[in-house]
Amino acid sequence: MPPSKTAKHRFERIAFLTSGTPEANAAKAGLAARFGTIDPETADVVVALGGDGLMLQTLHRFMGKNKPIYGMKWGSVGFLMNEFHGPDLEQRLDQAEASIVYPLLMEATGTQGESIKARAINEVSILRQAYQAAKMRISIDGKERLGELIADGLIVSTPVGSTAYNLSAHGPILPLDATLMPLTPIAAFRPRRWRGALLPDTANVTIDILEADKRPAAAVADHFEVKNVVKVTVAMDHATGLVLLHDPGHSLGERILREQFGY
């Protein structure tokens, strides 16, 4: 039985999720013994114990439910997470700062005309599937802007995702509250000097895959992949806000700012 609560806290019903490692499961058991076991679907807040992969999975699981997510690092990468420390969890949740992030909505069209939709918190990536580079045409808000891009791929990123795959592909890091979307090529061959674009986050991006039978490409929204696509549209989903909680002084916006200065 968890100890009785005498003080009113910001979140009364705390649920715990883990990455499934023995260490994370042991940490969850200790926290549940102290704070109780609550179904995540009915909790006021979800505490995710793991790395950034678990955080993304948790955000996807509760997409559109307006449920705050507080991550504690118990994994290899923890850019989105807080440091692990359990005994003062309720106090940390009381003081936590909220960051609102919006996902991208991807609609991918396959070779048979089928349409598949998915959301991405970090990025939507168009990736070559074979030994030949992908060949793409890029249109913004219905107007062609680049008639032919030959590259290993193309990334459309959110501000929070700008520090992930986008950064690895030499794209810009954006402040969390920037109303922009980076469009970043992966190993562009033609145009050789094209380094990408910064688009307003109200833009609708259309990528047509040229010579799709000869140069097959896949579309990936975070961890969800659609193979053999012929067309992909991407837009920011401003109607779906996701709430991340971080300790004071370690907000997501602060972490992104630090990343720009290399620490």
Image: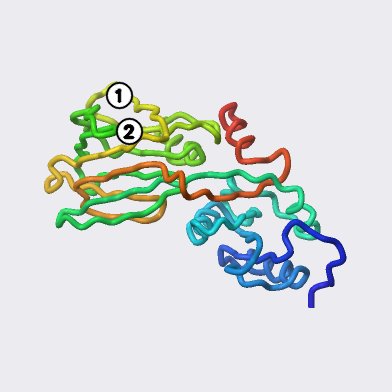
Q: Secondary structure at mark 2?
A: strand
The answer to whether residue 145 is above or below residue 92 is above
Q: Residue at x 49, y 45 (%)?
A: 102
Q: Is residue 239 left or right of residue 141?
A: right
Which quarter of the rendered picture does the C terminus lie within?
top right
Percent of width and height locating residue 41: 57, 68
Query: To which residue does mark 2 refer?
Result: 185
Q: How far apart, in angstroms, are the residues tagged by discs 1 and 2?
A: 8 Å
Q: Nearer the viewer, residue 133 or 31?
A: 31
Residue type (three-letter) at the residue carrying disc 2? Pro
Q: Is residue 261 left or right of residue 60?
A: right
Q: Quadrant of residue 138?
A: top left
The answer to whether residue 77 is above or below residue 141 is below
Q: Which mark is residue 194?
A: 1
Q: Secondary structure at mark 1?
A: loop
Q: Residue at x 42, y 35 (%)?
A: 201
Q: Residue at x 75, y 59 (%)?
A: 86
Q: Is residue 257 left or right of residue 207?
A: right
Mark 2 neighbour density, 10 Å: few (under 14) some (14–19) many (20 or more): many
The answer to whether residue 73 is above or below residue 123 is below
Number of marks in picture: 2
Q: Earlier in the sequence, mark 1 or mark 2?
A: 2
| Residue that protrudes farthest toward the front in the picture | 239
Q: Quadrant of residue 46?
A: bottom right
Q: Quadrant of residue 8?
A: bottom right
CB atoms of marks 1 and 2 within 8 Å = yes
Percent of width and height locating residue 122: 46, 45
Which quarter of the rendered picture does the N terminus lie within?
bottom right
Percent of width and height locating residue 197: 36, 27
Residue type (three-letter) at the residue carrying disc 1? Trp
Q: Nearer the viewer, residue 21 or 114?
A: 114
